[in-house]
Amino acid sequence: MLENTLINDIHIKSIEEQEGFPSLEVNLKKVYENTKYVVDLCENQGISVAGVVKVVHAMPQVVSEMDKAGCKYLATSRINQVIAMRKQGVEKPIMLIRIPMHSEIKQLVEYADISLNSEIETLKKINEECKNQNKEHKVILMMDLGDLREGVVDQEEFLNLALYVEKELNNLRLYGIGTNLGCYGSVKPTEDNLGKLCDVAEKIESLIGRELDVISGGATSSLTLIWDGKIPSKINNLRIGEGILVAKDLDDFWKYDMSMLHQDSFILKAQIVEVKDKPSHPIGEIFIDAFGNTPTYED
C-alpha cells in the first residue's frame, strides 16, 4: 500500500485510502503496466528506456514500479531526487537529465552514475571531483539540433568536445551523446534531425575507435517515430516520463491513439468549498491582482 505522505500540501495516497484533501491517488498497478508497455515497445526496436521520475518527486513506490517494469535507467533533473533514490536503495544506474550546476558536482559524482553535459568547464570540474572521490562518472554529451535547449550547436565544436572528454578527462567515460527536442523550441523530432544525431555519433565513434554506449534520441515526443516506424536504427535510448506516467501528450497534441495506456494512473481530488453565482467581470476600479499583474477581463 502506498503510504499517505504530504508533498507540497497535497496528500499522496493509495486508491484505498480516503482521508486528507487535496489528495493525489496513485494506482501503482497502472504505473507498472504503462511502464512495461513502453519498455517492451522500445526494446522491440533495440531502445532502452530511462524512466523519468521528476514529476512524482521520485516517490519510492512509483520508482519501484518503473524499476520492476524494466527501465534500464532511472532519471530525474533534480539532484535531491537522485540522492533520495540512491538512499532508498535503487541499484540501477541513475541519470541526471539536465546539466549539473557547479555547486552540485560533489553530490553528482557521489550519487549519480550518468549525467547530461555540454560545457567543457563543467566537465573539467566533474573530472576533478571524480579524482577526489576515486570514481568514474559517465557523461552523455548533448547536441542542440534546433530546439535551443541545452547542447552544442556547432558540429565541429561538438566533435572536439567529445574527443577532449575521451582523451583528456581520464576520470570520465564518454558514455554517449543525446539531444532534446519538443521542449523550449517546440521542434518536432523527425527522422531527419535524429538522423543527424546518428551521423555525428558515427563520426565520434570513428574518431575514438569504439562504439558509444548510448545514443539518446529525446523524450516522450520521440515515441511518435517508433509508432511511425521512422526512428533511426542507431538511436538506442529514450528518456520517458510523461509518456509512462500520464500518457496524455501524444493523445491530446499529436492525435495518436493512446488507448493501450492508462491515462488515470494519477487522480487529483479536492473538495468544493464554495458554490455561488457571480458576475463574470470584477466590480470596482481595476488595479492589480495578488501577483502584481493587471489582467483584462471579458464580460
Image (cartoon, grey):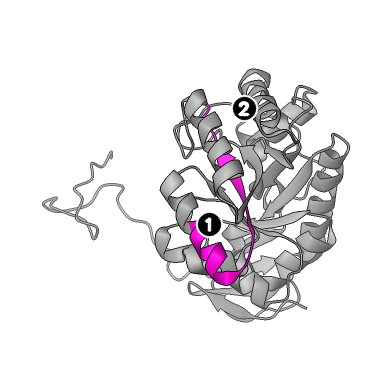
For the N terminus, the quadrant is bottom right
Residue 150, placed above or below residue 158? below
Q: Is residue 102 visible?
A: yes
Q: Is residue 219 visible?
A: no
Where residue 176 sits: x, y (%)? Answer: 66, 41
Q: Which residue is mark 1?
A: 127
24 and 138: which is toward the camera: 138
Is residue 18 shown left or right of residue 289? Answer: right
Is 136 part of what is drawn in magenta? yes
Task: Identify which amino acid the numbered label 2 is placed on.
Answer: Pro
Which disc is residue 189 wearing? 2
Secondary element under disc 1, as helix, strand or loop, is: helix
294 and 207: which is toward the camera: 207
Q: Nearer the viewer, mark 2 or mark 1?
A: 1
> What is the quadrant of residue 63 in the picture?
bottom right
Q: What segment carries the magenta color?
A: 126-146
For the C terminus, the quadrant is top left
Where residue 74 sits: x, y (%)? Answer: 70, 58
